[in-house]
């Protein structure tokens, strides 16, 4: 039987420290290492994925560091007022494929924002979560409110999901977010919702844990072939 998921609150932490720690955990966790959700908030930083194009950083003198990382996808921004949760999950043990993992993360974000009466949706071919046209915030329809990026190594995931709560959004204007020119980025505060950062973080972690455990229970009840994940996913 799969062990319970551990939730680790890491506070405000430099991106490089989180990056090094999750790589180290993945390399040393072994077959029985517990799955963990790391909740963190970063000082301002841009991250660029494996195949990322530096040209998507539109302003060279932002004063914000750029870190090249090993997830999939292009450039994104992390900063204060954003909930980041890293998912250190043994996908093989949970009989979970990469695409299923992405959809699970997206659904957890949708359910979290739904609790605040925010209507959001997936977008085909562009992982992440976007404001729905029918949300009542017409000026922000199609804007991105959450991004995700994963790395799978030895059947285990790291990196994760970021949800914009109440941020200075200007650094998103200095990039093509996730490689999309002109993509608007929004936060919960802009949509008229102002919960505490820690409240949103706890709710999102709860939803991620719920969907992971729900999938695992279903998979254990109906065994399936090992998905042997080996890909990256990102938005």
Image (cartoon, helix red, strand yellow):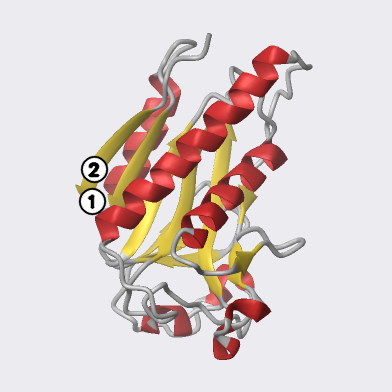
Is label 1 in a helix, a strand or a loop? loop
Q: Residues within 10 Å of mark 1 (few under 14, many from 20)?
A: few
Quadrant where the C terminus lies? bottom right
Expressed as whole percent of the image width and height from the top left, the position of residue 78 reads: 37, 64
Nearer the observer, 4 or 33: 4
**Which image quadrant for residue 47?**
bottom left
Q: Which mark is residue 13?
A: 1
What whole-number distance in Å separates the C-alpha atoms at marks 2 and 1?
A: 7 Å
The reply to whether dot 2 and dot 1 touch (C-beta < 8 Å) is yes
Q: Quickly name the residue at label 2.
A: 10
Q: Residue at x 65, y 64 (%)?
A: 121
Q: What secondary structure is found at the residue carrying circle 2?
A: strand
Among the 4 quarters of the image, the one containing residue 214? top right
Instruction: Give the x, y percent position of residue 4.
Output: 42, 20
- Residue 194 versus residue 160 in the image, above or below: below
Residue 60's place in the image compared with 156, above or below, is below
Q: Is residue 206 visible?
A: yes
Which numbered disc, 2 or 1, marks the residue closer to the eye?
Answer: 2
Q: Is residue 41 visible?
A: no
Identified at 64% across, 74% down, the residue is 132
């Amino acid at each position: 039987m799969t062990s319970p998921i551990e939730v680790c609150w890491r506070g405000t932490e430099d991106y490089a420290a989180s990056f090094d720690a999750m790589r180290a955990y993945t390399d040393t966790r072994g077959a029985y290492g517990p799955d963990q959700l790391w909740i963190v908030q970063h000082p301002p930083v841009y991250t660029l994925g494996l195949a990322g194009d530096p040209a998507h950083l539109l302003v060279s003198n932002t004063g914000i560091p750029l870190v090249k990382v090993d997830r999939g996808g292009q450039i994104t921004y992390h900063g204060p007022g954003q909930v980041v949760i890293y998912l250190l999950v043994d996908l093989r043990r949970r009989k979970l494929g990469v695409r299923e993992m992405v959809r699970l993360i997206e659904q957890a974000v949708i359910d979290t924002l739904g609790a605040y009466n925010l209507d959001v949706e997936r977008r085909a071919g562009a992982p992440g979560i976007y404001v729905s046209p029918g949300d009542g915030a017409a000026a922000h329809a199609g804007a991105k409110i959450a991004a995700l990026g994963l790395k799978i190594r030895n059947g285990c995931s790291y990196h994760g999901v970021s949800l914009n709560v109440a941020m200075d959004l200007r650094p998103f204007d200095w990039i093509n977010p996730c490689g999309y020119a002109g993509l608007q980025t929004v936060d919960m505060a802009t949509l008229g919702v102002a919960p505490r950062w820690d409240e949103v973080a706890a709710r999102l972690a709860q939803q991620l844990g719920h969907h992971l455990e729900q999938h695992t229970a279903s998979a254990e009840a109906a065994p399936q072939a090992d998905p042997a994940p080996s890909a990256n996913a990102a938005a």
